[in-house]
Amino acid sequence: MPQPVPNTQTGSLTDHQRGTDDTLIGVDNAINVLYGDAFAMDDHARGGNDTLIGGANATNILYGDANSMHDHASGGNDTLIGGANATNVLYGDAFEMHDHARGGNDHLFGGDGSVNSLYGDAFTMDGDSRGGNDTLIGGHGSINNLYGDAFSMSDNARGGDNTLIGGTGRGGPIADIALYGDASEMHDHARGGNNYLSAGAGSFIFLFGDAGTS
C-alpha cells in the first residue's frame, strides 16, 4: 500500500507515492515560494489536500502540489489563499502539467488590495493533461487575472468545469478584472470545460468563456 510522504520543497514524488495533507503559511513582508507536496511529481504520484496561505505585503508564489507534474501524476484538492496588499501568483496544482497529469478540484482566493494572478491548475498544460473543477475568487480593490485552468493549453489538454468570481477592481486607467474560463491561449486540440464567470465592479472588465485566443 502506498505510504504518505511528508512535504519536500526540493525533492520528488514518484511511483505511487502520495503527499500528506499539509498547511503551509508564508510570512509577511517577504518572498514566499511554497509547494504543497514536492518540487516535481512523476509516474502515478498523488498530491495531498493542502492549504497554502501567503503573507501580507509580500510576494506569494504558491503551488498547490508541485512545480511540474508528469506521466499520470494527480494533484490533490488544495486551498490557496493570497495575502493582502501583496503580489499573489497562485497555481492550484503546478506550474506545468504534461502527459496524463490530472489536476485536483482546487479553491484559490486572491488577496484584497493586491495584484492577483490565479491559475486553477497550472500555467501551461499540454499532452493529455486534464484540469480539475476549480473555484477562483479575486480580491477586493485589486487587479484580478483569473484563469480557470491555465494560461496556455495545447495538444489534447482538457479544461475542467470552473467557477470564477472576479472580485472588485482597484480603479484607474488599466484593466483590473480579466476572467478566462479556461485559458488565455488554447491551441491544437485543447478543449475547455463548462464554466461560470462573474465579475464585480471595475474600471475595465474582460470575460472570456473559454480562452482569449483559440
Image: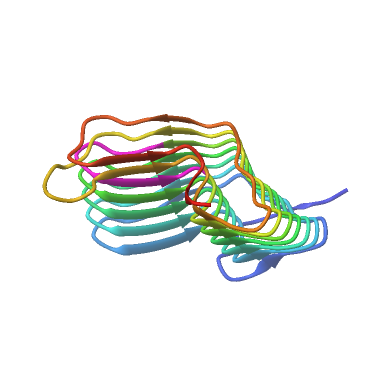
Please tell me in which quadrant of the rendered image residue 31 appears. bottom left
**In the image, residue 175 above or below residue 10:** above
Residue 124 location, x and y as percent?
Answer: 56, 60
Which stretch is magenta? 137-148
The location of residue 127, given as percent across then percent down, is 72, 60
| Residue in the foreground of this view, choosing between 212 and 203 | 212
Up-down: is 4 above or below 137?
below
Nearer the observer, 82 or 71: 71
Q: Is residue 212 left or right of residue 150?
A: left
From this viewpoint, which residue is outermost toward the bottom?
10
Of 74 and 170, nearer the camera is 170
Q: Residue at x 40, y 45 (%)?
A: 146
Q: Residue at x 62, y 39 (%)?
A: 160
The quarter of the picture where residue 133 lies is top right
Where is residue 98 shown, x and y percent of the image? 68, 62
Horizontally, is 175 left or right of 26 in the view? Answer: left
Q: What x and y, as percent, mark residue 81?
A: 40, 43
Residue 145 sits inside the magenta stretch: yes
Q: Residue reaching furthest left?
A: 172
Q: Residue at x 34, y 39 (%)?
A: 138
